[in-house]
Amino acid sequence: MVASRAPTTTPAAAADGGIEENAMAILDSSGIKDSRDLHDDRAAFLEAVRSACLAADNPSAPSWRMYDGVFQVLRNSRSLELAVASFHLLMDLGKQYPRTYLTDSDGHQSLVVVKESWLPFLIGNGSLSSEIGGNARISDHLFDPSRFSLLIEAMVERTNPTDDNNGIKAIENMMLFQYLVNTLEADFVPRHIAYKQSLDWVIFRESLLNMLLGSRKLVFKSFVKNCMYLLLNQFHPEAKDAVEGSIPSEGEAKSASDMHSSLNYFLLESERTLVSLRKLFVMVMELDLIRKEVDTLGLTSRADGFRNPITEVILEELTYNISYLSPFLLAFMERKWKLNIILQYFSKYCAKGAVRTRRSDSSQQDLKLGSVLSFFLTTTSAKAIVKKMGTEVAQLLLAHAYQVCLSVQSDSSDSTATTEKIGASLQEISCNFIYAFQNLRKVGL
C-alpha cells in the first residue's frame, strides 16, 4: 500500500452544516418511520456526504459527526445496498482525508498524525475526538479491543447466507472487518516508512495496531486462534486473483440488491475478508519484528508491556492441530512470512542453538532453509527428524518451502529478506531438495 498523502483540505474545514445537524435524526431508528423511509433517508444521507466531501468542486473534510454517521450506517445497515454504499464511502473518505500520512520537507519525510480526526476505534487516551465529550452513548458503537475480538468470533460462527437477515449481517460484519483492517493499515504503512528512516520506537508504540493488540481487553492468544480459524474457513482455492485488493463499487451493491439471494455476494466478500486477514497477519508480524529489533537495542521499557509474537501462537496451534497445517499453508501465501513460519516450525525439531535472552542478538542464530535441508541429506539424519515430526509433515513443509524458492526466482521484487532466509542459490537448493525427498522416501519404506 502506498503511504497516505496529505489531505486536500484541513480536517477543521466544515462540511455542509445542514448534513451534520440532521445526521442524528436521519440515523434514528426508534420506530417512528417505516423501514423504507429509514432506508431512503440513510441513502440520501450517504449521498449528501459524498457530494459535500468528495464530489464538490471545492470539497471539504467531513465533520466528526458526519464520519461517525456513515460508520453507524455500515454497522446497522439492514440492507445490502446501504452496507456496500457506506463501506465504499468510508474507504473513499479515508483515501481523501488520511489521518496518518508523510510530508516531504527538504528531501526528508516527516510523519503527520491528525489526532483529532475521527476513528472507528476506541483505544487509549488520545483516540477519541473531543466531540465525544465523555458521552458513552455517542461512542458505544465504536470498536474497543474487546469488541474487535468479538467481531472475529462472530465471523467464525457458521452463518447461513441464504437467510436474508443472517446473510446481510454476515456481509456487514465482513465489511466492518475489512474497513477496520484498512484503517489499521493506513496508520501502519506511513509509520513503517518513517520508522525505517529514524529507528524511533515511539512511532510504533503509538500506532493503532500496537495499542489495539497491547490492550488488556484483548486476549491475544485467543484472538490469533480465532483469526486462524477464520482464515481456514474463508479460504477457497478456486478464488480468482482479481479479488485481491478490490473494493465493492456502488454499482455492485445495486445489482446485488436486486438479487433474491445474497449468496454470490457473500462468497465474494468472503474472499475479500481473506485478503484483509492476510494483511492483518503480515502487519502483526512486521510489528513483532520491529519490537524484536528495539528490544535488542534496549529501546523498550516495562511500559511497553509484553505479549508473545504472533508466529509463536500460530506455531503452537499448527503443532497441536496437525490437520490445520496444510490448509493454513495454502491460505497464507505471503512468501516471506510463510517461509519464516516453516523455518520456525523446523527449528522446534532441528535447531540446537544457544538459549536466547530477551535482548540477545539472535540474528546469526536464525535457521535458514539451506541449513534445514542439511538435516535431510543422509538417511540417518532424516530418520532422526522424521521420528520427531513425521514424514508427511516434513514433506509438506519442504514442498511449500520450495514453492517459495520458485516464486522468489520468478519475481525478484522485494525478495531480499526471503533470499537471505533461503541461504543458497536455487540450483543448490533444488539439488538438496531432491536428496531430501529421496531420503524421506527411503525412511518411509
Image (tube, grey):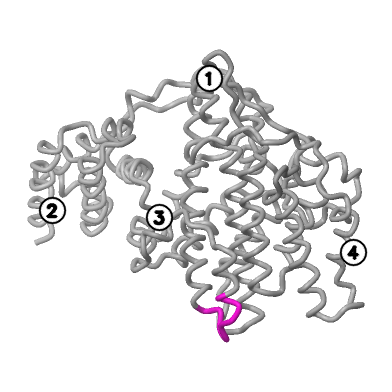
The mark that comes first in sequence, 3 or 4, is 4
Q: Is residue 189 above or below residue 281?
A: above
Indicate the quadrant containing the C terminus: top left, top right, bottom left or bottom right. bottom left
Tell me the quarter of the picture where residue 390 sits.
bottom left
Q: CA distance from mark 2 to mark 1?
A: 45 Å
Which percent across, then down, holds residue 269? 52, 66
Q: Is residue 376 left or right of residue 18?
A: left
Contact (Cβ within 8 Å) of mark 4 with mark 1:
no
Label 2: which secondary element: helix
Which percent across, then down, holds residue 339? 32, 43
Q: Nearer the viewer, mark 2 or mark 1?
A: 1
Magenta-highlighted residues: 255-263
According to the picture, the residue beneath numbered tag 4 turns out to be 25
The mark that comes first in sequence, 1 or 3, is 1
Q: CA distance from mark 2 to mark 4?
A: 69 Å
The mark that comes first in sequence, 4 or 1, is 4
Q: Nearer the viewer, mark 1 or mark 3?
A: 1
Q: Which mark is residue 318?
A: 3
For image coordinates 66% across by 26% down, the residue present is 302
Q: CA distance from mark 3 to mark 4?
A: 50 Å
The amino acid pointed to by label 4 is Ala
The amino acid pointed to by label 2 is Leu
The mark that comes first in sequence, 2 or 4, is 4
Q: Residue furthest front?
A: 57
Local packing at callout 2 (Cα closer than 10 Å; few below 14, some 14-19, many 20+) is many
Q: Which mark is residue 199?
A: 1
Q: Which mark is residue 440?
A: 2
Local packing at callout 1 (Cα closer than 10 Å; few below 14, some 14-19, many 20+) is some
